[in-house]
Image (cartoon, helix red, strand yellow):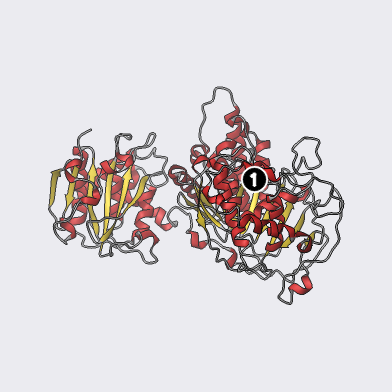
């Protein structure tokens, strides 16, 4: 490895090669430009400033595209409605001096005959990304423009060379003509890439060298077919885009409404009159005349350490307001709440104020028969609802949780809070007659957007947001758990009330919650979790006065050993579970789905297998999918590539299922090394033989 070689590509046709030590240049934020001309400035960051260019990868290169003319501070080009047009490639930083000079000469040759690019930035970024080049955004303080840097990395059995970059640039300069020596060199290198597994270079051969621009054929094919085949986030359907014809809110045998629907149609929200029922099929209320439970243990609050300054501020004011809210329960919830029991599809709709009263009682641990977890207890199949475990064994995790919960109570006890919103909890069950014959499914894959940036809770707003749930809904939200589900419940504390009446989910069941309000901003997972402050929810409401937010709770299997999941019984279980949640209601327009690495992490799920399972379930349900990889750039790229390959071959759900059978049988064989599912699918040629 040689030292860093900074290649300055000037605005004209001359090239200067100058060695510049990183320490001599100083940190990027202290470097200044000597002239307002872009061609005289030095790139805002060199490879030594980037984490991936520290010698970890053997063949690391950097190419920077400058978009002159954009004012400093504008968002990066791919996020603009009309992205700026890059005028030319200006800077490269390469570790190897020989490669740096060779690449510089090639770029000089290509750019000498062209004065302006003809492709917009977004398209160019997409195709460079297909070559396997990592994208890093950096805002330059040196020039009045935005700078985009692409960090090339060597992958297993795959190197990205200057020819691929040259071909890519040439494709976006269509008026450029190649010289004969370049054609010969390109034809030679084209045959070397025949074994490449990347979609952008697969299928190339020396036979294509007869074409004048044969080296760009793969890139051109991707362009004709829509890039990576993945759609943009805006192309997917949200609740606000759906024509939701809900009809009048009404009671039914399977739908319990805890407000007066007649008065509701007149524009008011008042509790439905009813009577108390002390029965095993209903929630046993703390205000019931049949309740013989002792008074709540107020000493629990004395266990909170004085070091929690945030909570100290609420002892004298907010705690008393929560107590007053809890005392309003008898008047706010007169009708008995049914339990959402296993194998019985049912729905409960109640007001946000009723939820607040119920959660205030849970905060003071007043619900009878709900403080024990013994296997023979009455509610052993239900999650806990009283907050007693949250107050015990104090830790910083629980301190951060209490901050989010206190923010919720601080808002709902305020006189300015509107209490006329509704929330619906629906338990869905997939009947045996509705279970698909996965081997015979003919549906092709639907829309897909894959991203390593953003979250289900933020960028997925308006879509059907998947909660990576536990069988006992809410997981460890009232204890020490702090992963995706628990954080989702802390952001939307109204979800916690589902633990009051939702029995443990079975293999073909899910819970869908519509209308919850978000109250907090949070950051981090587990011990890094922090409550960041209040969130002001401005979502629209539907005809039932529910916020247009829909959350789907589906629980994945927990594998003690990762190889357990390569069983078709387990795969079918996950397919049916996902399909149960993704399947829409007949005759109703439904939003697309926001999901991610469901069942991975602590549950030991294979992220590639889970992605394919969710793609298949969404295709069967005829809904689009947004897949958040949570900063996993490698999974993002591989999923985009395999999705494009499958879509190009018009793969059906049934064909994928048959190949999963083969793949799982290979993984179960003793002594067989693990091959990733995407690697396996990348080698197959569809359609599958009928004998499979």
Residue 67, image x, y percentages:
27, 60
Decide: is 83 above or below 688.
below
Q: Quadrant of the C terminus?
A: top right
Question: Closer to the camera, 258 or 401?
Answer: 401
Residue 595 appears in view: no
Residue 95, image x, y percentages:
23, 38
Q: Quadrant of the N terminus?
A: top left
Question: Closer to the camera, 354 or 330?
Answer: 330
626 horizontally vs 183: left or right: right
Question: Closer to the camera, 338 or 61?
Answer: 338
Q: Quadrant of residue 141?
A: bottom left
Residue reaching furthest to the bottom: 266
The residue under label 1 is 301
Helix, strand or loop at label 1? It is helix
Question: Closer to the camera, 196 or 190?
Answer: 196
Residue reaching furthest to the front: 316
Residue 623, image x, y percentages:
60, 57
Decide: is 266 above or below 284.
below
Q: Quadrant of residue 120?
A: bottom left
Residue 415, image x, y percentages:
62, 68
């Amino acid at each position: 490895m040689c030292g860093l070689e900074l290649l300055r590509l000037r605005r004209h046709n001359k090239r200067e090669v100058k060695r510049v030590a990183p320490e001599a240049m100083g940190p990027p934020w202290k470097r200044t430009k000597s002239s307002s001309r872009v061609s005289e400035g030095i790139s805002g960051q060199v490879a030594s400033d980037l984490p991936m260019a520290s010698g970890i990868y053997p063949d690391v290169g950097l190419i920077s595209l400058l978009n002159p003319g954009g004012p400093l501070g504008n968002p990066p080009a791919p996020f603009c409605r009309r992205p700026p047009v890059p005028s030319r490639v200006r800077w490269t930083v390469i570790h190897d001096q020989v490669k740096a000079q060779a690449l510089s000469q090639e770029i000089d040759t290509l750019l000498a005959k062209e004065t302006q690019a003809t492709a917009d930035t977004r398209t160019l970024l997409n195709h460079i990304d297909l070559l396997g080049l990592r994208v890093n955004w950096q805002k330059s303080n040196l020039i009045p423009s935005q700078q985009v840097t692409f960090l090339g990395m060597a992958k297993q059995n795959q190197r990205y060379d200057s020819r691929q970059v040259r071909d890519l640039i040439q494709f976006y300069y269509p008026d450029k003509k190649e010289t004969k020596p370049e054609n010969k060199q390109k034809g030679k290198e084209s045959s070397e890439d025949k074994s490449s597994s990347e979609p952008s270079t697969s299928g190339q051969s020396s036979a294509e060298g007869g074409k004048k621009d044969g080296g760009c054929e793969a890139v051109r094919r991707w362009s004709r077919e829509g890039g990576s085949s993945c759609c943009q986030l805006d192309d997917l359907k949200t609740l606000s885009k759906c024509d939701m014809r809900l009809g009048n809110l009404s009671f039914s045998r399977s739908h319990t409404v805890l407000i007066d629907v007649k008065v509701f149609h007149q524009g008011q929200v008042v509790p439905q009159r009813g009577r108390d029922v002390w029965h095993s099929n209903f929630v046993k209320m703390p205000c019931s005349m049949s309740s013989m439970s002792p008074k709540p243990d107020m000493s629990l609050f004395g266990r909170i350490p004085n070091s929690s300054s945030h909570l100290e501020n609420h002892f004298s004011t907010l705690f008393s307001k929560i107590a007053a809210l809890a005392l309003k329960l008898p008047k706010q919830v007169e009708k008995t709440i049914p339990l959402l029991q296993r194998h019985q599809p049912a729905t409960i709709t109640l007001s946000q104020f009723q939820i607040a009263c119920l959660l205030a009682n849970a905060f003071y641990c007043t619900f009878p028969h709900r403080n024990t977890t013994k296997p023979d207890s009455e509610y052993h199949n239900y999650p806990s609802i009283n907050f007693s475990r949250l107050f015990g064994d104090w830790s910083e995790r629980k301190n951060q949780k209490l901050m989010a919960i206190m923010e919720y109570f601080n808002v709902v006890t305020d006189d300015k809070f509107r209490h006329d919103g509704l929330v619906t909890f629906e338990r869905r069950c997939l009947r045996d007659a509705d279970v698909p014959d996965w081997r015979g499914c003919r549906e092709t894959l639907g829309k897909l957007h894959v991203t390593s940036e953003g979250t289900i809770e933020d960028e997925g707003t308006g879509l059907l947001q998947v909660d990576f749930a536990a069988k006992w809904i809410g997981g460890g939200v009232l204890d020490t758990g702090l992963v995706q589900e628990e954080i989702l419940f802390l952001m939307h504390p109204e979800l916690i009330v589902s633990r009051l009446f939702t029995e443990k989910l079975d293999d073909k069941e899910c819970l869908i919650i519509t209308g919850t309000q978000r109250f907090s901003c949070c950051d981090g997972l587990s011990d890094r979790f922090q409550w960041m402050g209040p969130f002001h929810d401005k979502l629209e409401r539907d005809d039932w006065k529910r916020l247009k937010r829909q959350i789907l709770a589906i629980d994945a299997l927990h594998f003690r050993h990762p190889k357990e999941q390569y069983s078709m019984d387990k795969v079918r279980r996950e397919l049916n579970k996902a399909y149960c949640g993704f399947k829409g209601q007949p005759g109703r327009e439904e939003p697309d789905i926001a999901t991610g690495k469901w069942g991975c992490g602590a549950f030991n799920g294979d992220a590639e297998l889970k992605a394919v399972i969710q793609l298949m379930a969404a295709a069967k349900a005829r809904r689009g999918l947004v897949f958040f990889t949570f900063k996993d750039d490698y999974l993002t790229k591989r999923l985009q590539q395999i999705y494009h390959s499958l879509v190009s071959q018009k793969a059906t759900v049934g064909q994928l299922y048959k190949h999963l059978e083969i793949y799982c049988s290979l993984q179960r064989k003793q002594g067989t090394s693990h091959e990733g599912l995407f690697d396996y699918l990348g080698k197959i040629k569809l359609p599958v033989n009928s004998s499979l």
